[in-house]
């Protein structure tokens, strides 16, 4: 007997099973290339993170010079905020996102990059306003995801403030679709503050124009298989003492550095074998 909540169908003998939130997000990523994942942060924790974001942003602008960054179109991007505030390491290691990465990328994935992203008010120039993949310049498909990007919404994402736009299922096609198809099929992903918009990193997406009077803030993460080069060499940038414990060291890529000599290779091999 078909229940009232079951979608009408016929001629169907196979169906993906219903699952928990992680399983549902994994199914959506596989089929559509994107999903929304709750972070579990409460209102107080979210507000504290906003204040920390603004403080890190001010620190970067003061250190490097706002006009210097504007000249290279980096004034609305904060590279690797976890270097300046460990609260952003905790954000990168959010349990729900990590569980999804384990499900889709398997063991041994790493944090490839973390960037604070500001979509400026009043439709100002915005570096993420053009369609792209988070593995840019790549034109191929793979049987499993090579990387996921998880955009944490510090502010609510709406049509008015430039919510992310995606081309559904474009992670399955090597080429960027025709402009006509993109215009007819693109979808705006509204998302509440405190959630992650997670994409297969090969899904084409962009930020929309922010027509409001307030900047829209977010923190983007790319998680990848360990074979991929990080945007910034995190172990070198963070230093040997930053990561405490084997889980954080593996996550940040300390275990995936290329040895600089045969002696380093043999030493790493001995550590791996416990000899």
Image (spheres, helix red, strand yellow):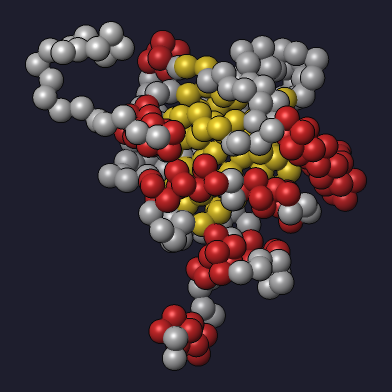
Asked if 195 appears above or below 232 in the picture, the reply is: above
Q: Please identify the residue farthest to the right as the structure is shown.
A: 62
Q: Would residue 231 be visible to someone looking at this image? A: yes
Q: Quadrant of residue 67?
A: top right
Left or right, 2 with respect to 255, comes to: left
Where residue 153 appears, as percent x and y from the top left, is: 64, 30
Where residue 217 appears, as percent x and y from the top left, is: 72, 30
Left or right, 68 with respect to 173, comes to: right
Where residue 93 appears, as percent x and y from the top left, is: 59, 50
Tell me the residue at 60%/36% (across/down). 40
Tell me the residue at 28%/44% (across/down). 143
Query: Which one is nearer the viewer's eye here, 275 or 121?
Result: 275
Q: Would residue 173 be visible to someone looking at this image? A: no
Query: Which one is nearer the viewer's eye here, 173 or 188?
Result: 188
Asked if 145 appears above or below 155 in the picture, the reply is: below
Q: Quadrant of the N terminus?
A: top left
Where residue 102 appears, as percent x and y from the top left, is: 42, 51
Label count reads 0
Q: Quadrant of the C terminus?
A: bottom left
Q: Quadrant of residue 38?
A: top right
Tell me the residue at 61%/13% (across/down). 159
Asked if 269 appears above or below 144 in the picture, the reply is: below
Tell me the residue at 15%/28% (across/down). 14
């Amino acid at each position: 007997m078909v229940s009232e909540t079951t979608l009408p169908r016929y001629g169907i003998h196979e169906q993906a099973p219903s699952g928990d939130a992680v399983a549902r997000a994994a199914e959506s990523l596989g089929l559509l290339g994107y999903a929304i994942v709750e972070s579990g942060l409460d209102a107080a924790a979210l507000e504290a993170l906003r204040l920390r974001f603004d403080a890190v942003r001010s620190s970067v602008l003061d250190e490097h010079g706002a006009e210097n960054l504007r000249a290279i179109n980096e004034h609305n991007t904060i590279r690797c905020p976890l270097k300046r505030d460990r609260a952003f390491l905790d954000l990168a290691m959010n349990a729900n996102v990590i569980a999804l990465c384990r499900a889709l990328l398997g063991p041994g994935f790493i944090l490839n990059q973390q960037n604070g992203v500001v979509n400026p008010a009043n439709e100002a120039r915005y570096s993420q306003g053009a369609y792209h993949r988070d593995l840019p310049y790549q034109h191929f498909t793979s049987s499993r995801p090579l990387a996921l990007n998880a955009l944490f919404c510090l502010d609510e994402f709406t049509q008015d403030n430039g919510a992310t736009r995606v081309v559904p299922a474009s992670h399955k096609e090597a080429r960027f679709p025709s402009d006509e198809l993109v215009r007819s099929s693109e979808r705006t992903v509204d998302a509440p503050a405190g959630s992650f918009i997670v994409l297969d990193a090969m899904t084409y997406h962009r930020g929309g124009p922010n027509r409001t009077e307030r900047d829209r803030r977010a923190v983007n993460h790319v998680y990848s298989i360990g074979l991929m080069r990080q945007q910034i060499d995190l172990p070198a940038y963070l230093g040997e003492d930053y990561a405490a414990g084997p889980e954080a060291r593996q996550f940040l890529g300390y275990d995936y550095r290329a040895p600089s000599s045969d002696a380093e290779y043999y030493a790493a091999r001995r550590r791996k074998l416990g000899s």
